[in-house]
Amino acid sequence: MEYWIGLRTGIALILVIGAQNAFVLRQGLRREHVLAVVATCALSDAVLIAAGVAGIGAAVDALPWLMPLLRWGGVAFLGWYGARSFLSAWRGGAVMTAGEGDRVPLAKVMLTCLAFTWLNPHVYLDTVVLIGSLSAQFEGREWVFGAGAMSGSVLFFTTLGYGARLLAPVFERPMAWRILDTCVGLLMWSVAATLIFADM
């Protein structure tokens, strides 16, 4: 029972399309390093969930400088990536067909993926703090709940990354890529704005 509760919780927390999910979707549409991106996102979530179940949330509370550092690092990264997406939308034509176009080196994709994951303060709140505190309700079965949450992450990112190819016919049109890049840019900047004004 705890496993299925954890599975549903894990999926629910990452279901909303955020900066990381938009990046995974775009990589899936490009059919570029999809396995590496999906594995990186799922493994990162697993590490963070394990930290939460192990009680690291209390340690995060004890380091008051950590969350502001992640917050402003995230703002800078999201601002840069949003501007890059807007530039791509304005130029247009960079990728006309899903799976085609100039391939980005794996190392660069991985660094971007890790930045989306580890520079996002919300991921710590969702995984380390929230899932960690929820797991404490299942005394003696915390790791079963945590395993369910990890499985939810694997299921979600795999579906998003590999399911994106079903949208490939739509993205055979240049305008579709321009719209996607514009939406990604708006999403990145809106998340950055949320981080900036979080305490106001």
Image (cartoon, rainbow, N blue to C red):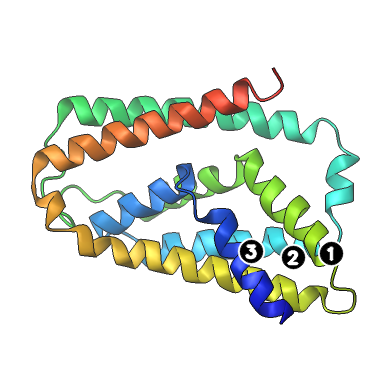
Residue 196 appears at what percent x and percent y?
61, 21
- Residue type, numbered disc 1: Ala
Residue sitting nearer the eye, 88 or 16: 16
Q: Which mark is residue 54?
A: 1
Q: Which residue is mark 2?
A: 50
- Assign a secondary structure to mark 2: helix
Whether label 2 touches label 3, CB < 8 Å: no
- Residue type, numbered disc 2: Ala
Indicate whether 63 appears above or below 83. Answer: below
In the figure, is residue 22 to the left or right of 59? left
For image coordinates 29% across by 60% down, the residue present is 164
Whether label 1 touches label 2, CB < 8 Å: yes
Instruction: List the single residue furthest toward the top.
Output: 200
**Image quarter hosting the C terminus:** top right
Give whichever of discs 2 and 3 has the lower sequence position: 3
Badge 2: how crowded within 10 Å, few (<14), some, or many (20+)? many
- Residue type, numbered disc 3: Thr
Whether label 1 touches label 3, CB < 8 Å: no
Q: Which mark is residue 9?
A: 3
Indicate whether 197 appears above or below 127. Answer: above
Marks 1/3: CA–CA distance: 17 Å
For image coordinates 84% across by 64% down, the residue present is 54
Badge 1: how crowded within 10 Å, few (<14), some, or many (20+)? some
For image coordinates 90% across by 74% down, the residue present is 139
- Assign a secondary structure to mark 3: helix
The quadrant holding residue 188 is top left
- Assign a secondary structure to mark 1: loop
For image coordinates 55% across by 63% down, the residue present is 11
Residue sitting nearer the eye, 54 or 1: 1
